[in-house]
Amino acid sequence: MARPLVVDASVAAKWVLREVGSSDAARILDAFRRGHLSVFAPSLLVEEVAAVIATRFRRNLLNSRQAVEAFEQMLIYLPTLVRSNDVARSAMRLATQHRASFYDCLYLAWSFELKCDLVTADARFFRSLNNSYTHVTMLGAFRIH
């Protein structure tokens, strides 16, 4: 049985953009594609990763062809998308409890709902939670068993 895992947009973006941590993210993607992990994310992941790609394009870090290719790759590599509104109340409670982004807390709420780890590459988000939740892991520290 595949191990469930929630990844946030900071991890999924590394699946299609070459940057620090991309090789760690690629290991998660490979385990997902091989069926060793069941990877989940709120449906807003598409918009969040697309926004990162578009920002890279606007900053001239990607040309238009690279941006479109990265977006198309992201659509191929999508984890199982879950409805954000199914955990919105929980996410709002978490956001107010931790003074964290509601969007970030949607990922956290889904990790509780699915009773699994949440992997992030967002150091600020991680620091805001790591004293409270042991199941939230920085990308570089996550190990696939």
Image (tube, rainbow, N blue to C red):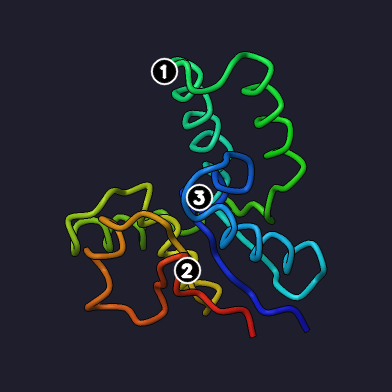
Q: SS for tag 2?
A: strand
Q: Quadrant of residue 88?
A: bottom left
Front one among 17 and 91: 17
Which-is-in-front pick, marks 2 and 3? 2
Residue 44 picture location, percent across and down: 52, 41
Mark 1 or 3, closer to the camera: 1
Quarter of the C terminus within the rendering: bottom right
Q: Residue 122: x percent and y percent?
A: 36, 54
Q: Earlier in the sequence, mark 2 or mark 3?
A: 3
Residue count near mark 1 (Cα–Cα under 10 Å), binned few <14, some 14–19, many ≥20: few
Give the SS element for disc 3.
helix
Instruction: Report crowding for label 3: few under 14, some 14 to 19, many 20 or more residues within 10 A (C-alpha).
Output: some
- Check disc 3 and report the residue beneath it: 84
Up-down: is 34 above or below 55? below
For this view, does 31 lie left or right of residue 101?
right
Which mark sits nearer the N-terminus, 1 or 2? 1
Q: Residue 44 carries which label?
A: none
Please tell me the numbered disc located at residue 59: 1
Within the image, what quadrant is residue 141 found in?
Answer: bottom left
The circle drawn on residue 118 is: 2
Residue at left offset 65%, top offset 65%? 27
User: In the image, is 14 to the left or to the right of 55?
Assistant: right
Name the amino acid type tagged 1: Arg
Residue 113 location (% of width, % of height): 50, 72
Q: How many labels does the image show?
A: 3
The image shows residue 49, relative to residue 79, as above or below, that is above
Tag in front: 1 or 2: 1
